[in-house]
Image (cartoon, rainbow, N blue to C red):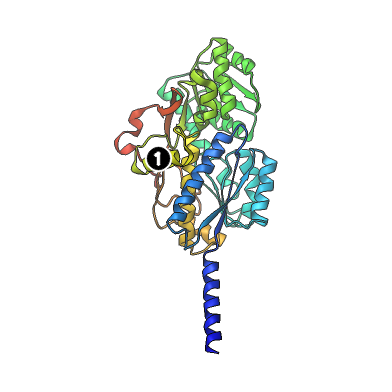
């Protein structure tokens, strides 16, 4: 009888240990193929790097993190399908990713309805984190640690008009939700400085000839091209100007830092400027360690999209901190923990000190990004003084 009781106790103990060691499943979705892949792959690899580090250190609450990875190909309908699968079939406790604004707006509602937190760690459309805010919704499960387009458009307008003195900007934006919402934000930002674009032109994903749009901008007397689009098409703008023998500066959203722009545009892309939350430079010990770990893990020198990699990496550490604070994987408790994180999280982009609140799900404020500049196939600081000394690490503004 005693032996039987002992064996039962051992079985219960082993069963409990097995349960405790069950992995914490987190969704990971983004475009890992196609025109947006340099963003998606970099984000994915940054996420995997963080997960590996956390698991080697014992996981979260004694449990390893297991990623459930899906390629949405930057397609809205596929993003919707993946979100439903992650929620209903894979039973993830949270999800990270969303590179493309259109995919996020179409798909994140399934996480919201299931009360599962989701991190937008790259998509920047201004409305993303406000799609399900109270009082219309009981609680908001959408979080972001990327610089939204309201922040970026204001930075672009200020750089072009106030810092560099351009008076006749032309806007070239793609036809996606990302491009068109960004164009609207940019037009609004320019209006605050009393500037109206001399031309506003649209193009489609996959377009390789920007002659028509560029000629209209040139004929309107544009002295700068402002952009909202993805890397491959942005490269066609730079290459198109070269073919026309017309060169004016390009200042646009953060996507001008993508490898698909830099490599396709070549020398024609030099001088392009864009807001960046992270430039691949070892300006803090954390950034140095991250860069070296990424290079070693993936056998690369230049990260294809440093911003995407860093923000993906940071999103996992933020989630891990929230799960630890919540004491489990209940979606509502994880959301509540994210809205009131008690411990600081040292990230690559910044040190996160209460990055969210019940009414603010944006971790990045307008004082964090700086301008990058394409030079010789890499992104470097456009204004080195902006990251000098204690400006190297910028933290969220306290309201």
Up the image or down, 246 lies above or below 122; here it is above
Can you say which quadrant of the picture contains the N terminus? bottom right
Up the image or down, 93 lies above or below 72; here it is below
> Measuring 47% from the left and 59% from the top, which residue is drawn there?
60
Name the spot of residue 154 as percent of width and height, x first: 48, 32
Q: How many labels were placed on the picture?
A: 1
Q: Secondary structure at mark 1?
A: helix
Name the spot of residue 248 as percent of width and height, x first: 50, 16
Q: Label 1 crowding class (10 Å Cα cut-off): few <14, some 14-19, many 20+?
A: few
* Residue 124 visible, this angle: no
Name the spot of residue 302 as percent of width and height, x first: 45, 32
Quadrant for residue 394, please give it: top left
Q: Residue furthest left?
A: 389
Quadrant for residue 301, please give it: top left
Q: Say which of 360 and 314 sits in front.
A: 314
Taking 39 as reference, is 372 left or right? left
Name the spot of residue 197 as percent of width and height, x first: 55, 21
> Measuring 54% from the left and 68% from the top, which residue is drawn there?
18
Q: Residue furthest top?
A: 245
> Measuring 42% from the left and 52% from the top, which residue is drawn there?
354
Name the residue tied to disc 1: 292
Q: Residue furthest bottom?
A: 1
* Residue 310 visible, this angle: yes
């Amino acid at each position: 009888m005693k032996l039987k009781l002992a064996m039962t106790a051992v079985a219960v103990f082993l069963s409990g240990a097995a349960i405790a060691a069950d992995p914490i499943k987190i969704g990971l979705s983004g475009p890992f193929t196609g025109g947006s892949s340099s963003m998606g792959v970099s984000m994915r690899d940054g996420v995997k790097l963080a997960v590996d580090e956390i698991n080697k250190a014992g996981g979260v609450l004694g449990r390893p993190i297991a990623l459930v990875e899906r390629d949405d190909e930057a397609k809205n309908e596929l993003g919707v399908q993946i979100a439903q699968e992650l929620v209903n079939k894979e039973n993830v406790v949270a999800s990270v990713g969303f590179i493309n604004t259109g995919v996020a707006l179409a798909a994140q509602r399934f996480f919201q309805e299931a009360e599962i937190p989701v991190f937008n760690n790259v998509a920047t459309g201004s409305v993303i984190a406000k799609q399900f805010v109270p009082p219309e919704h009981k609680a908001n499960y959408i979080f972001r640690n990327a610089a939204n387009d309201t922040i970026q458009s204001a930075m672009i307008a200020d750089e072009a008009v106030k810092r560099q003195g351009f008076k006749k900007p032309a806007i070239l934006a793609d036809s996606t939700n990302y491009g068109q919402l960004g164009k609207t934000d940019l037009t609004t930002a320019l209006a605050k400085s009393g500037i109206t674009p001399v031309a506003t032109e649209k193009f489609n994903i996959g377009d390789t000839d920007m002659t028509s749009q560029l000629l209209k901008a040139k004929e309107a007397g544009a002295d700068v091209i402002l952009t909202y689009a993805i890397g491959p098409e942005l490269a066609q703008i730079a290459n198109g100007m070269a073919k026309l023998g017309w060169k004016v500066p390009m200042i646009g959203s953060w996507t001008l830092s993508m490898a698909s722009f830099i490599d396709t545009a070549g020398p024609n892309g030099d001088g392009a400027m864009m807001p960046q939350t992270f430039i691949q430079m070892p300006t803090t010990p954390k950034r140095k360690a991250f860069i070296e770990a990424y290079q070693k893990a993936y056998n690369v020198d230049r990260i294809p999209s440093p911003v995407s990699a860093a923000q993906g990496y940071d999103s996992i550490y933020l989630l891990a901190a929230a799960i630890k604070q919540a004491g489990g994987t209940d979606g509502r408790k994880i959301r509540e923990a994210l809205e009131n994180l008690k411990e600081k999280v040292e990230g690559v982009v910044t040190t996160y000190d209460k990055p969210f609140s019940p009414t603010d799900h944006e971790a990045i404020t307008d004082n964090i990004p700086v301008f990058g500049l394409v030079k010789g196939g890499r992104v470097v600081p456009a204004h080195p003084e902006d990251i000098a000394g204690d400006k190297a690490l910028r933290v969220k503004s306290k309201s």
